[in-house]
Image (tube, helix red, strand yellow):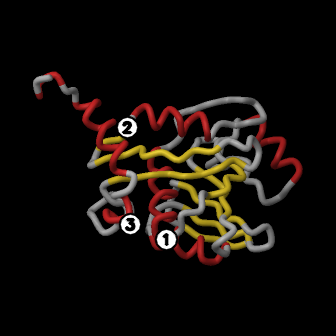
Amino acid sequence: MKSSDISRRGLLRAFAATALTAAPFYANAAGVLRGAGDVRRITMRSQRTAESIDIIYWVQGHYIEEALTEINKFMRDWRQNEVIAYDRNNIDILAATHRLLETDEPYLMLSGYRSPATNAMLASRSRSVASNSYHIRGMAADLRLSSRSSSQMAAAAIATKAGGVGRYGRSNFVHMDSGPVRTWRR
């Protein structure tokens, strides 16, 4: 096979397949977010659907569209089975935070994208659900790690200096979104 027969996408796939073991060594490389690196990986499991995802979605300055499609499906509103294009910036925030936490444990995702109908239903049951939540825009996730406290997770998310970080200590989860930089505790 001639080198001209290899597509850019093929090279990215091949690199992504082999980069998984090298990913930790890129932690100090330049990236959009502190700690994001030249290879970005997200690993989560869903509390609601029992699905898991462990995927490299960004390699040397380029998002891998097939990986983003998988992430969109994973982050869907499971109540409505509704999928949208989940915000890439929030994926980067989640990945950078995870890397800063220095754990191999996948996030436990409590909530990703929420349709307006799902969000309205949840808001009617709880005052802590914003009526115009970033979840509706596919820009937020509520996450937990059994190996890290919500304080540790929030501190790592704040260290990325991107988006909103809400610490829910009693429920032991952290909200991360790609909206304006701000923090809160409940």
Residue 51 percent across, percent down from the top left: 68, 41
Which residue is located at x 69 percent, y 73 percent? 185
Cα gap from disc 1 to disc 3, whole angstroms: 11 Å
Quarter of image, res 81: top right
Residue type, mark 2 in image: Ile
Q: Secondary structure at mark 1?
A: loop
Residue type, mark 1 in image: Glu
* Residue holding disc 2: 64
Q: Nearer the viewer, mark 1 or mark 2?
A: 1
Residue 57 percent across, percent down from the top left: 42, 44
Image quarter (top left, top right, bottom left or bottom right) of the C terminus = bottom right
Can you say whether 1 is above or below 139 in the image? above
Which residue is located at x 60 percent, y 57 percent? 106
Which mark, by number, is residue 35?
3
Q: Nearer the viewer, mark 1 or mark 3?
A: 1
Depth check: 42 or 186 in front?
42
Dot placed on the residue nearer the N-terminal end, 1 or 3: 3
Cα gap from disc 3 to disc 2, whole angstroms: 19 Å
Which residue is located at x 84 percent, y 42 percent? 121
